[in-house]
Amino acid sequence: ALANHRFITMASAANANLNAVRETMDVLLEISRLLNTGLDMESLSICVRLCEQGINPEALSAVIKELRRASESFKASENCTN
């Protein structure tokens, strides 16, 4: 019975942690939308995980902006050739 109680307690803690993570991501996504970042939930999750691993947020932001610029430039040059 004690082992079963521990399992239920661990499952409850894991579930509470999962709910907290979901709530945090929902708040971050809303902030992201308010700031017009253009990041979807998957992209935002990747950014959060990278920051948790020690990536500098300002450097990550600069890389994302540069990738967007390069993508827009590529699209514009592709449209000119069509």
Image (tube, rainbow, N blue to C red):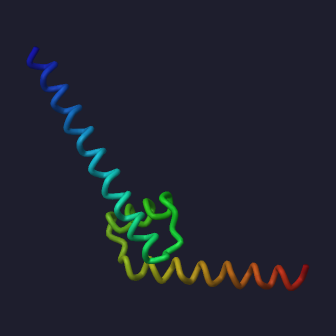
Looking at the image, which residue sits at the far right?
A: 82
The C terminus lies in which quarter of the figure? bottom right
At horizontal 25% and vertical 39% (from top left) the residue drawn is 14
At horizontal 75% and vertical 79% (from top left) the residue drawn is 75
Query: Residue 11 lies in what quarter of the image?
Result: top left
Q: Position of residue 74 (x, y in %)?
A: 74, 81
Query: Residue 51 lies in what quarter of the image?
Result: bottom left
Q: Position of residue 37 (x, y in %)?
A: 49, 75
Q: So how many labels did they put on this image?
A: 0
Query: Residue 77 lies in what quarter of the image?
Result: bottom right
Looking at the image, which residue sits at the far top?
A: 1
Please state which of residues 37 and 5 is positioned toward the viewer in this rendering: 37
Locate residue 58 relative to residue 40 in the image: left or right: left
Q: Position of residue 25 (x, y in %)?
A: 36, 58
Locate residue 4 relative to residue 24 in the image: left or right: left
Locate residue 21 relative to residue 73 in the image: left or right: left
At horizontal 25% and vertical 45% (from top left) the residue drawn is 17
Q: Is residue 1 above or below residue 5?
A: above
Locate residue 12 relative to residue 53 in the image: left or right: left
The N terminus lies in which quarter of the figure? top left
